[in-house]
Amino acid sequence: MSFLKKSSLLVSLCLGLFVFGSLQGTGCSNNNTNNNNDAGQTEKDITKDTNNTTPDKTTNPPDKTTNPPEKPVTQDETTPTEKPPTSSVTWYKHVQPIIRKNCESCHTKGGAGPFALTNYEEVKAKGKAVEWSVKNRRMPPWMPDGKDCYELEHSRRLPQAQIDTITQWVAGGMVKGDPKDEVPYNPPVDQLDSVDSEVGMQDSYTPSGKTPDDYHCFLTQKALSKEEVLTGFRFFPGAKSMVHHVLIYSVAGSYAQQLESSKGKHWACTTGALFTSGSVSKSKLIGVWVPGTDVIRFPKDTGMTMQAGEHIVLEMHYNLNALKGPLPDKSKIQLQFAKTPVKHQLKLALQVQLALSVPANSTNHDVNHTLNVPNKIKVWGFMPHMHKFGTKYKVMHQKSDGSKSCLVDISRWDYNWQQTYFFKQPIEMERGEKTFMTCTYDNPTSNRLRWGDRTEDEMCLNFYFVSAP
C-alpha cells in the first residue's frame, strides 16, 4: 500500500477514534508537520536522503515547564523498604518477599520467563543475573521512568531500596538464613475480576506463508445477548510468536451479518479496515493487543458500552520473519462487564505521525508530533507504540497557561514489553491545549525507515483512553 493511501486510511481511523470534536487542525490531521529534521516533509521531499540526524536532547519545544498539579512522583518511592546491613541480608527474611512479589508470576515452571525463580536454589543459581537485571532496570519489565511524570497505576518499577537489598545479598554470599523468617505470601492472580464472556476465532487459521506479513479479520462466534458495559478484557494469542498486533473492534449486529454473508467467518483486510468504506458508525475500536500486554482493566467507574447483538471482530497482523514457517492460530478474548452503572464512558483517541522518516545509518533521531485537543476531555490512560528501531518515547502536555507536564517518559524502549498504562488520577485537558509526542530511533540499516505495518518498518503513535469531563 502506498504512503498516501496509508495516510488516508489512518486519517479515517483517527476520525473514528477521536469522538470529542472536529479533527481539523488536530494531531490526526493529515497536514500536520513534524518539528524535527525531514520527518514532516511531503512525500516528494522525504525521498531526498539528507542524512540529517537530531540529537535526543531537544525532544520538546523549550518553554515554561512545570510539574503536574499533584506532587511529582518518583515511582521508586512508592514502596519504601528499609535497607538492612549487608551482613544481615538473608534469603528468607529480605530477598524472598521481593522475588515472590515481583518475579514469580513469570519466572515459574511453564511461565513466560526463560527460567524459574521460585525457591532459594533457583535464585542463587541465577543470583548475578538477577542482580544485574534489577540494577539495570531490565526486570521487572516496566518501561516508564516514572520521575517527574503523572503517577501510573500498578507500577512494576522496583524501589531503589529493594534493588540495594538484592545487591547486598549477592555481595554477602547469598546467605539462606533461617526458614522461620519466611514471610507468609499469597501470590497475586493476574486475571480479570470476572470472565463474563469468552469469544474467539471460529476456526483455526494458518497464514499462507507467501509473504512475511498477513493481515486478517476474524468475526467471533457469539453476539451479545443484551447491552453491556465493558470494563476489562484479556486477549490470548493462539500462536504468540506469530502475532504482531491485534486491533479489537465491537461491530453492530446488522453489520456483522453483512460481513459474514459477504466475506465469511474471516477475510483478508488492511489496518483500520473497519473504519473505512462508511463503516465508522457501525464499529468501534475497544482495545489493542501488542507483545507484552496481558490483562486490561479499565479504571474504576469507567467502561465502554456495547449494544445487544454486537460482535467482536479481531483484526490480526501476523508476522512470519522470525519463524521457519506459518503456524496455526486460534486466538480468543475474555471480556469483563460492569456489575453496576459506570460514571464515565471511555473512547479511544489516536495521536499519530504518518510522515515518519528516519535516515539510514542514524542514531538518536527524533520524530515529533503535536496534537491540538479539540474539546475538554479527561485522559485516563494511554498505550504508546513503536517498532524495534525505537529507543525512546516521550509525551508532554502543554496547558492553557503555557506550562508543561510529563505524561510519559520512556528512556529505554523495549518492543517486547509494550502495554497499556492508566493514570492514578485522570488528567483533565482543556480545548486548545496540546500534547507533544517524541519518538526516538536508531537506524543502523542502509535504508531510510518509513511509516509501515511491517516489523521492519516503523510507527510513532499513542492511543489515549479518554472520556467527556
Image (cartoon, rainbow, N blue to C red):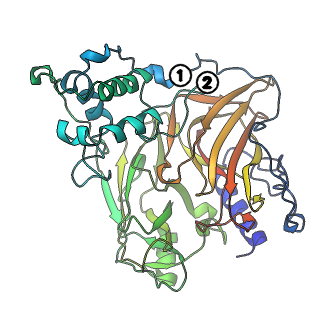
Kindly state the secondary structure of the residue where label 2 is placed. Answer: loop
- Which one is nearer the viewer's eye here, 53 or 396? 53
Q: Position of residue 257 (x, y in %)?
A: 47, 75
Residue occupied by mark 2:
148
- Taking the view exactly as shown, the residue that stands out farthest to the left is 180
Residue drawn where x is 22% and y is 35% of the image: 187
Residue occupied by mark 1:
74
Q: Position of residue 123 (x, y in %)?
A: 25, 39
Q: Is residue 462 above or below residue 397?
A: below
**Left or right: residue 70 compared with residue 34:** left
Q: Are marks 2 and 1 in contact (CB under 8 Å)?
A: yes
What is the crowding at mark 1: few (fewer than 14 residues within 10 Å), some, or many (at least 20)? some
- Which one is nearer the viewer's eye here, 154 or 124? 124
Kindly state the secondary structure of the residue where label 1 is placed. Answer: loop
Three-letter amino acid code at disc 1?
Thr
Q: Is residue 70 above or below residue 144?
A: above
**Left or right: residue 371 compared with residue 246:** right
* Among the 4 quarters of the image, the one containing residue 47: bottom right
What is the crowding at mark 2: few (fewer than 14 residues within 10 Å), some, or many (at least 20)? some
Three-letter amino acid code at disc 2?
Asp
Q: Position of residue 101 (x, y in %)?
A: 29, 32
